[in-house]
Image (cartoon, rainbow, N blue to C red):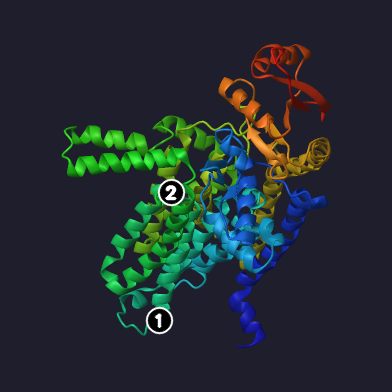
Amino acid sequence: MSYYSFLKNHWRFIILIILSVFFFTFGSFYIFQSTQENKFLKFSSPDETANYFFTKLYAEKNKLQYSEPLNGISKNIVHPRSIGVVNGYLVPMSFLGIILVYGIIAKFTSLIIIPYLTLFFALIGVLFFYGFVKNIFSIKNKSGSGSDIAFVSAMLMFCLTPYWYYSLKPMFHNVLFIVLLIIGLFFLTNLNDSKLNSSKIQNWKANLFLFLSGIFIGLAIITRISELLWLLPVLIIIGSFNIKKLDILKITLFLSGIFLTILLIFYYNQILYNNPFKSGYPEMNKVMCQTANETFEFIFKHNHLPIGSYFTDIKSKIFYFGWHPREAFLAFSHYWLEMFYWLSLPSILGILIFIIKKRYHNKKRIFFLISYVLASIILIIYYGSWVFHDNPDPTRITIGNSYTRYWLPIYVFSLPFASIFILKFLQLLKKRNLRYLSLILILFIFSCLFYPSLMWNSEEGLGILSSLSAKSFIDYKQIINLTKKDGIIITIYGDKLMFPQRRIVYGKFDDKNMIKQYANLAKFNQLYYYGFSFRQKDLDYLNNRKLKQVNLGIRGVKRINKDMSLYKLVKIKNKQE
């Protein structure tokens, strides 16, 4: 094949690779500047802090638990947010997938790369997304149609603000989940009918792809087990649509890939939580156990409740955040239809074109639409029924609120439909060169809308968070210099700043039982409090009422910034002693 022929056949993929290198270069610079400058490796959320801590621990020591002896004398209160305590050990309160995947990679490479792995996987995801969409929308007798839809979809992915927002917040697991799922679906959809119909063991490529599909879908599951709520129905539909084309060997290979990864989680769940079916999320454990128990009772004990009441109760357990469809679709309108209108509107119009135009209709593409609609409805109702307040101002609708990461699958898999609309619109132009120039202009406009919404359009934009990181480094250095190395800091907001360099207790002074445990800890280690600055009357109240009862007092150490101060808790001798 000549050089010209190679470029002619692969120019789309080459452009995507060039853009990926560009994104990785500038994204890596942002991550370094915001999290690692001056060797100040800190993150903007407690979830990220916890995930990084355990990823590093796993890479270095092959462990996912960290001993904290002081929990034995304080009823397990010595831990930051997003980290739990089991038998005195600090353990993850998150899905283990990201910790295991990144930990294994860092184990064989370097700890330095951990903050860059999400960005790297995000770019790999764009390339596999191109292949996945091309597999779905390849249209016979219309040369290039499937490739064009795939190419525009991948280009739009470079403009998908929430995707890159969480790619540049390195230790969230949402982007890793969606990328692993895309890779698994790529291998699954890369099998044409002739390969699926073949029963020959020599058809090693089809068998390998099915096994790899199972592996990557399994990795996606352990990265965010909660996504099984919509992923499991979709996988069941896939299987039912293709049941006549599959034999026992192929089904076994696919399921073996999934089960191998899930067995890994069962193994670590047993070690960490003393039960292979428990996770780090107490709420999920409660939901899963209650639902399983009630299902068992209904099936085997002939529950006397009417079947309608039974399923209503199960629904209330599965939809942990509630069942409020109206509120859910209102939230969705804010966080998709309004916030990213330049992508949501073309996606909706593209779905309408897809339904109307028969040239798009075949089993594979119709199934894709059905799966997308089903998954979207489940995700919208499941997460939209709850009100998340990640922003201190509950009235603000910003990209940092959790909806944007929970609904990432909806955003990503809407892109092929947006591409259909854009390409249909460009067909109005008669000249081919004019269509290409117009496509470049459309993508340029989208990128102009993308960058401000990513960096500056709210107080949670990445540009603003980066500037806050520089200020946090100043606060961090002050606190480190003013506290003892083995000291314990009681805090509500400072855990992500001070852990693991200092032991953390997540707490305040409004709980008598917690205050009693503070007194226990004060016998062994110096205690500090870091939080919003107290007024003098508040300090007097704590010293004369709350802390006096356990022979403690609180003294100011230093005002760290305009809002926050560091305090020291001191032991006070009882006059009767």
Q: Nearer the viewer, mark 1 or mark 2?
A: 2
Q: Quadrant of the N terminus?
A: bottom right
Q: Look at label 1 and name its amino acid.
A: Trp
Return the disc, 1 or 2, that comes first in the chain's sequence: 1
Answer yes or no: do the residues labelled 1 and 2 have beta carbons within 8 Å?
no
The secondary element bearing badge 2 is classed as loop
Q: Write down the quadrant of residue 539 in the picture.
A: top right
Which residue is located at x 42 percent, y 47 percent? 278
Residue denoted by label 1: 204
Q: Quadrant of the C terminus?
A: top right
Q: Nearer the viewer, residue 51 or 441?
A: 51
Which residue is located at x 45 percent, y 33 percent? 385
| Residue 28 position (above or below residue 201) | above
Q: Nearer the viewer, residue 168 or 426?
A: 168
Q: In whole angstroms, how far apart are the C-alphas of marks 1 and 2?
A: 40 Å
- x, y percentage for residue 405? 56, 45
Which residue is located at x 60 percent, y 34 percent? 390
Q: Write down the quadrant of residue 156 in the picture.
A: bottom right
The secondary element bearing badge 1 is classed as helix
- x, y percentage for residue 466? 76, 44
Residue denoted by label 2: 274
| Residue 286 position (above or below residue 200) | above
**Residue furthest front in the image:** 577
Using a 10 Å C-alpha cutoff, classify the residue at mark 1 as few (fewer than 14 neighbours), some (14 to 19) or many (20 or more): few
- x, y percentage for residue 449? 68, 46
